[in-house]
Amino acid sequence: IRFGGENEYLPVFSAFFYRERIRDLIFLHRTVSVVWEPRNEERARQQGVDVQLSQKLVTDHLHFQAAYSFIEALNESTEPNRRGREIVFIPRHTLNSSLWLGLGPLHALLVYRTLSERQTVPANTAVPLSAYDVWDLSLNIRHEFGPLQLDAGYALKNLGGTSYELLRGYPMPGREYQASLSVNYVFKNQ
């Protein structure tokens, strides 16, 4: 389902609903000896909704986007301790949003993402991975010198220094700083 797009000042909204059955669901399982190995969960069911909203607040200068996902991923294994349990590492709720600002050669992007807690063992008996929120900010400037195009950028990832893990025992970096510089030669047809 998609609405909008006729007028550049109106928001664009889209939604995708799905339901699927999975046979031979393979994922990496951490053994007692801390070795990751493939494991077949046999069958699973996944259903959910993905929605997205985008809006040009000021044409060519300020844009907003947000995307939300709700996923119900359940194990349909024949083993009683796993049947009906959430599939590991899949968050029920995910939200990503961004605000883009462009002023001439300067561009800024502010990104926010949040994930709900995730299960770590198929029986859902362990403490789940915590939910987390992360903010990122990037600044870029472009300048042209004849056929040369210079792009310089600076990014602050995980502005708040949020402590989180994608997999149990594997923490993601805290605040991260990135700088980039690229020089491109642009061929112009005459």
Image (cartoon, rainbow, N blue to C red):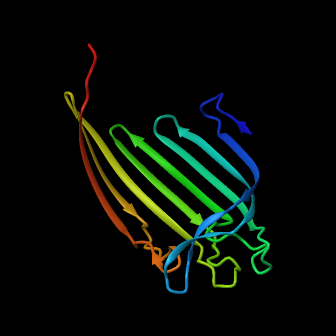
Q: Residue at x 50, y 66 (%)?
A: 134
Q: Nearer the viewer, residue 13 or 104?
A: 13
* Residue 1 occupies quadrant: top right
On the rendered structure, is 178 left or right of 33?
Answer: left
Give the answer, above or below, for where 111 lies relative to 145: below
On the rendered structure, is 39 left or right of 111?
Answer: right
Image location of residue 51, percent across then percent down = 68, 49
Give the answer, above or below, for where 136 lies relative to 13: below
Image location of residue 179, percent across then percent down = 28, 56
Give the answer, above or below, for where 11 lies relative to 163: above
Q: Nearer the viewer, residue 152 or 168?
A: 168
Q: Nearer the viewer, residue 79 or 122?
A: 79
Q: Residue at x 38, y 54 (%)?
A: 138
Q: Residue at x 65, y 39 (%)?
A: 12
Image location of residue 81, percent across then percent down = 76, 81
Q: Residue at x 64, y 79 (%)?
A: 121
Give the answer, above or below, for where 8 lies relative to 83: above
Q: Nearer the viewer, residue 68 or 91?
A: 91
